[in-house]
Image: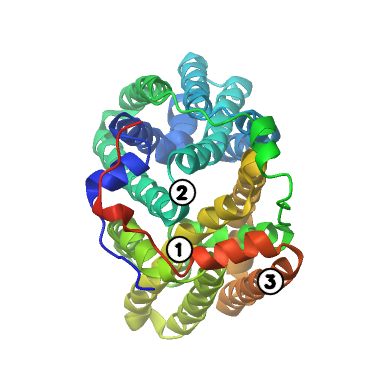
């Protein structure tokens, strides 16, 4: 059947949780954009900590924040939705408060603040996806998730621009940015909580779906660890290669990052709608092929030398961003489509664990491989990403044999797309 690729913004807004929730997402992302890029600078310039100590504390906070995911999953499986989203924002308020209260040179309080910020950052994606899956279904849910990501990236970029403009103010400006971030998180938490979205208790939902098996997602979760490396390519890999190896101007790195943000904001929803005619798992595997092609493109671009190397890398980065957009539009949507309602929270928590782990280890892997040469970096990334895409496809075949109901439903949803985007839904 034909796939509808037009969408009314009002319909997308209500499918995403309603106007208040959209404002909460924007305010939360704006606050994160104000602080996240400059948390390292805060530790170094305001608290007078060494760069290695500050970086280690931030990494430890991110990794330790993953420990909260099983608890978040169980909470979501009990039916909580907007409450968990608000809690993830309130935890970050506590992190910012500790950051402001940390005296100069105190690494332990800074690490504790980074821990609370990490907990909030890790809990939010799963809670947000569960909330959207409660108010929207099928391809409507996929478009709503894509719209939320586009909105969040736009607000993150705006926050980062404001923070960059304020850097000339020195330590006072950084403290002010931290305070504004805390207030933004607090306002966002209040707005998210006011939406009052809850799901049916897991026990009641289980009575309706006792005969539906829970698909195994081991290959999907393992592949996701590799897929998320693409998110750190514009921020870590390309600046490292361009500036330290090709000796190109830092302007190229900045331009690539800005282009990545603009493309995600403008194309995330249209690309997700365009791929809605295909099964989500096939789209996710295709994203792996696109990312693999981009990594091989980076490998070829680095051989062009200083004159054409930087422009070629910038051009290939567009392909990499398209792979990122296709991946982001299909991965979480696939998890929400495969997981039965009683196990949705746990499935999203496991998925976020794989995402958080991949994001945590990818900078270390990239910075270890880069000095070994372009072939070691881009060749390795291409090989493991292609292997991950193959694993996603292989799991699809075995999943259809073991879990005919869930796999068939997911496949059917890939061939039809309702006309929901031509109507606006009532608010929640």
CA separation in Å, label 2 and label 1: 23 Å
Q: Nearer the viewer, mark 2 or mark 1?
A: 2
Give the image location of residue 25, x and y in percent.
36, 35
Give the image location of residue 122, x and y in percent.
57, 38
- Mark 3 = which residue? 391
Q: Quadrant of residue 270?
A: bottom left
SS at badge 1 = helix
- Mark 1 = which residue? 324
Q: Residue at x 50, y 23 (%)?
A: 83
Q: Are marks 1 and 3 in contact (CB under 8 Å)?
A: no
Q: Are marks 2 and 1 in contact (CB under 8 Å)?
A: no
Q: In which quarter of the image is residue 72?
A: top right
Pick the front one: 243 or 330: 330
Give the image location of residue 238, x and y in percent.
45, 65
Q: Is residue 422 left or right of residue 335?
A: left
Q: In this view, does 101 lie above or below 221?
A: above
Return the mark for residue 137: 2
Q: Is residue 68 visible?
A: no
Viewport quadrant of the C terminus: top left
How dense is the environment of label 2, judged by Cα within 10 Å: few (below 14), some, or many (20 and up)? Answer: some
Q: In this view, does 95 lie to the left or right of 390?
A: left
SS at badge 3 = helix
Q: Residue at x 71, y 56 (%)?
A: 215
Number of numbered discs on residues? 3
Residue at the limit of the structure toward the right, as seen here:
402
Viewport quadrant of the N terminus: bottom left
CA separation in Å, label 1 and label 3: 18 Å
Q: In this view, does 158 lie above or below 92?
A: below
Q: Is residue 107 above or below residue 273?
A: above
Mark 2 or mark 3: whose residue is earlier in sequence: 2
């Amino acid at each position: 059947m034909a796939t509808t690729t037009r969408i009314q913004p009002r319909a997308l807004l209500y499918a995403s949780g309603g106007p208040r929730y959209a404002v909460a997402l924007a305010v939360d992302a704006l606050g994160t954009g104000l602080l996240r890029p400059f948390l390292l600078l805060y530790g170094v310039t305001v608290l007078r900590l060494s760069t290695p100590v500050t970086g280690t504390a931030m990494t430890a906070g991110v990794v330790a924040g993953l420990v909260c995911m099983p608890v978040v999953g169980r909470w979501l499986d009990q039916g909580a939705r907007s409450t968990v989203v608000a809690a993830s924002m309130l935890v970050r308020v506590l992190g910012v408060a500790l950051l402001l209260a940390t005296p100069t040179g105190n690494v332990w309080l800074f690490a504790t603040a980074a821990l609370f910020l990490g907990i909030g950052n890790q809990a939010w994606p799963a809670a947000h996806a569960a909330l959207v899956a409660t108010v929207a279904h099928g391809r409507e849910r996929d478009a709503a998730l894509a719209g939320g990501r586009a909105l969040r990236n736009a607000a993150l970029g705006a926050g980062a621009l404001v923070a960059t403009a304020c850097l000339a103010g020195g330590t006072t400006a950084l403290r002010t940015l931290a305070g504004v971030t805390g207030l933004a998180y607090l306002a966002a938490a209040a707005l998210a909580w006011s939406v009052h979205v809850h799901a049916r208790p897991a026990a009641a939902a289980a009575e309706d779906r006792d005969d539906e098996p829970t698909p195994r997602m081991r290959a999907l979760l393992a592949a996701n660890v590799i897929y998320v490396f693409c998110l750190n390519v514009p921020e870590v890999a390309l600046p490292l290669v361009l500036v330290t190896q090709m000796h190109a101007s830092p302007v190229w790195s900045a331009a690539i990052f800005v282009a990545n943000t603009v493309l995600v904001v403008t194309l995330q929803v249209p690309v997700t709608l365009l791929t809605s005619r295909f099964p989500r798992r096939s789209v996710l595997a295709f994203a792996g092929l696109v990312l693999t092609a981009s990594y091989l493109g980076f490998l070829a671009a680095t051989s062009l030398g200083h004159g054409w190397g930087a422009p070629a890398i910038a051009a290939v980065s567009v392909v990499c961003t398209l792979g990122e957009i296709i991946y982001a539009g299909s991965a979480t949507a696939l998890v929400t489509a495969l997981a039965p309602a009683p196990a949705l929270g746990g499935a999203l928590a496991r998925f976020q664990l794989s995402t958080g782990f991949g994001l945590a280890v990818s900078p270390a892997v990239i910075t270890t491989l880069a000095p070994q040469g372009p072939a070691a970096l881009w060749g390795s990334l291409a090989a493991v990403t292609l292997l991950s895409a193959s694993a996603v496809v292989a799991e699809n075949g075995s999943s259809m044999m073991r879990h005919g109901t869930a796999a068939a439903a997911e496949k059917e949803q890939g061939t039809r797309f309702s006309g929901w985007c031509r109507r606006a839904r009532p608010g929640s």
